[in-house]
Image (cartoon, helix red, strand yellow):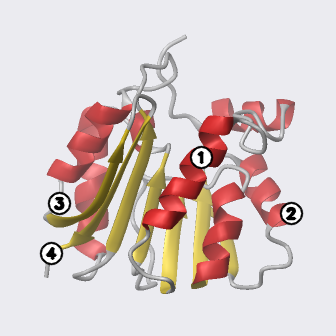
Amino acid sequence: MSPRSDPEFFDAKYRADPDPWNFDTDWYEIRKRTLLLAMLPHPRFRSALEPGCANGHITTELARRCDRVTATDIAPRAVELTGIRCRDQPNVEIREWGLGRMWHWENIFDLVLLSEVVYYLPADALTLAIEDMASHLRPRTTVVLSHWRHTEKDHHLDGDEATGIALAAFPHRCVARYLDADVRIEVVTTNP
């Protein structure tokens, strides 16, 4: 199979299994989520954007720390599943949208979470998507990149390549970094 970034591929995965990456049970997923949330530099944020929200595991945690969360995914079924998981969290808005599509958010985000999503774009498309995103963010916006470091047949890039491209595409200051054999997490703020 070749690298994928099409909504139909992801939608089929979520229709076949509402938890195709075992977010509920896989130790990597549980540990990554815990590390990522612990690395956020503030206890509370006004407004977060989470492209690639999958079935809402991180979304529910963000909703506890953010006044407003905009969670998006390109797979309609993932959007439905996030809606079900977050039905008791009125501060969560869920939309069908993906990184790499035209930026149309009027919200002012002070947190953007890119977890397990940037390597689904080819290098050129990723650069353009991050540059577009960065042009709409205010100074001192926290941006988190968290990615699996291994090569996968469905990914255009591995986690290190994708994270490096994303970080090179906008001016930032490093806040925190975590790296092990499986996961790389970078927490940065956009430059003033």
Question: In the rendered structure, which amino acid carries the disc numbered 1?
Answer: Arg
Picture quadrant of residue 181: top left
Question: Circle 1 sits on which residue?
Answer: 31
Nearer the camera: disc 1 or disc 3: 1
**Precedes in sequence: disc 2 or disc 1:** 1
The secondary element bearing badge 3 is classed as loop
Q: Secondary structure at mark 4?
A: loop
Residue 84 image label = 2
Please report whichever mark, 3 or 4, sits nearer to the chain's N-terminal start. Answer: 3
Residue bearing mark 3: 170
The answer to which image quadrant residue 88 occupies is bottom right
User: Which of the two labelled residues, at mark 1 and mark 3, occupies the earlier sequence position?
Assistant: 1
For mark 4, does the 10 Å Cα neighbourhood hold few (<14), some (14 to 19), or many (20 or more) residues?
some
178 vs 88: above or below: above
The front one of 39 and 167 is 39
Marks 3, 4: nearer the viewer: 4
Separation (CA) of disc 1 from disc 3: 28 Å
Q: Quadrant of the N terminus?
A: top right
Query: Along the polypeptide, which appears first: circle 2 or circle 4?
Result: 2
Q: Which residue is tagged 4?
A: 191
